[in-house]
Each structure stands twice: as C-alpha cells, then as structure tokens.
Amino acid sequence: MTTYKLLAVDVDGTLLRRDGSIHHEDLRAIRRLQAAGVPVSIATGRLYSGTRDVARQIGVIGPIACVDGSHIVHTGGDAHLYSRTIFGADATLLRSVIERHAMACFLFAQDSIVHDASGAPHVHYVRTWSSAIAEVERVLSHPYWEHDHGLLALVAIGTERQITAAVEEIRSELGHVAFVVSFPVARDPRASIFAMLVRAAGPTKGTAIAWLAEHHGCSPADVVVVGDWLNDVPMFEVAGRSFAMGQAPESVKQAATDHLEADGSLGGGIAEAIRRAFGH
C-alpha cells in the first residue's frame, strides 16, 4: 500500500459545508492525520484573507495555496512565499477592456477586494473569496491597477454578450499573460447574468500541489487531494491520489482516481478520503 505524505484539500464544497462550518468527523480525521505526522494543506480559489481563519481552524501551520495557485502564503506569520499577478502594461490593457465593455468589476489585490457602486448588487457573489471587501468611488481609477505587486485576479459581471465579447478580447490581446474563464451567475428571463474570472496565466492548483510537495520534501505522487469543482481538475491530474466529492460534476469525477459518497453540503468527505487513502 502506498504511503502518502501530504493531504491538500479544497475549501468551498469540500472542507466547508454550505453553512460555512466544518463537519466534526472531518475535523477529527484531519487532527488524527496531523498527529500521525502527515502534514495537511489547502488549495483554494479564495484569497488568503478569506482562507487564513479556515486554515487555522484545522491546525494548518505552513504554506497554503490561494487564488488557484497564484498566491502561496505561510499561515505562521502570514509570509508571502509565491505570487503571480497581472501588472504594468498588461494591467492597463485589461482595464481598457473592462471599461470598453462597461461591466461591474471587482479587483483582487493586496489580499483584498475593491469595487464601486456598479458592483454593489453583486457583492454577495464575491464574498466567498474574502470578507476584506471595500467599496470605492470608481474602481477603474483605483491605485491597484498601477500597484507594483499587480492584480491577483479580477471578476467582472455583465450580460452574456458583454462577457463573451470581453473574454474574446482578453484571449486575443492578453492570452500570453492572462487566464480567463466565463460562466453564468444567474439566469433571468429578462437578462442572463454572466461573470468572468481573470488571473495570471500559468499557476493552477496543479502547480500549487507541485510547489507544496517540494516544500514538504516529497513528490506530487505522494500527495492526496480532495476537491469538487473544475478548478480542482489540475490538482487531480498531478496528485498521486485524488478524491472528487459526491456532488462534483461528472467531468470532475472522471478526472479523479476516486469518488466520494459524501456530499459537500453535509460534509464528511475529508474523513472518508483520509480513511480510504491513509487508513486513519
């Protein structure tokens, strides 16, 4: 039986239940694994500010991967270990695309989120990434666009036509430096609401698992991962063993080595994965 050396888990829909709590069985299983000397980490789409308390709740003192691998931070002292952003002329070009298509915009930078009045109706959607959210007078004029550290990510919300046109333009003009994905947020008979997420090209949860494995002195093949969504597929593809939550889409389940019975809304998936992969 393979002896795995690291567990990395997704947060929303995997570690956290729908109400934001952690199932007691998951918490106990994580603590047993840590007591046995196996480190536990996190790979999430959230900002670090939206993940730190969760990590500390399960006793993770070490690096965790945020913004789908674009930002890696050590929870003991909040030291920034790795960051990939969009900055300089590329950020300026991205801003011009957002302005041209007149979409509501949320900037993810400096471990926080800023928006203006146009984004206020959609704040509930981005709140899962972080609670460090501030409304500013005009987001397109905010200093984050020119900040030396650049943008960790951007979320824009608009009609399907606006989002589709902006995605095509970003892929054409910034495809070498920016990753962009679009998806429906809500469907309304009057107007469907769509969103797009933009972040630096290159990092994924897969590259994050490779980074975390090296940090802990092992290879990705020694890592067990648990997730439930499309952004978890890259880490499924590199880890030695991968578990897809019960509610995961079929395409996500197909990318994993194992399927879990547990549903993320109820919890228990982490405990099930630990029992099956580590015997704890």
Image: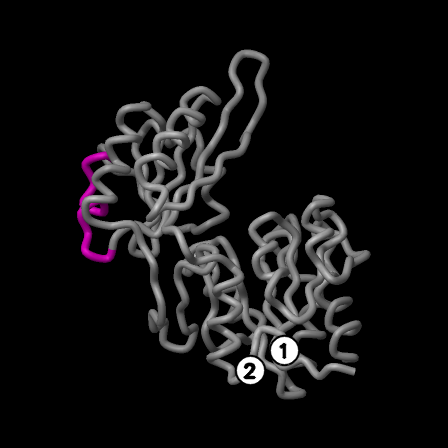
Q: Position of residue 161 (x, y in %)?
A: 45, 20
Asked if the residue at tag 2 contacts the one at tag 1, i.e. Cβ–Cβ closer than 8 Å, the answer is yes
Q: Quarter of the image holding residue 255?
A: bottom right
Direction from residue 75 to residue 80 in the image, left or right: left
Query: Looking at the image, which residue is at 25% across and 36% down?
Result: 95
Query: Looking at the image, which residue is at 61% across and 54% down?
Result: 233
Q: Position of residue 267 (x, y in %)?
A: 72, 57
Which residue is denoted by mark 1 in the rendering? Answer: 222
Image quarter in which the N terminus is found: bottom right
Write down the region rendered in magenta. 140-149
Q: Quarter of the image holding residue 158?
A: top left
Q: Position of residue 55 (x, y in %)?
A: 52, 68
Query: Looking at the image, which residue is at 45% across and 42% down?
Result: 126
Which residue is denoted by mark 2 in the rendering? Answer: 218
Q: Is residue 214 magenta?
A: no
Image quarter in which the C terminus is found: bottom right
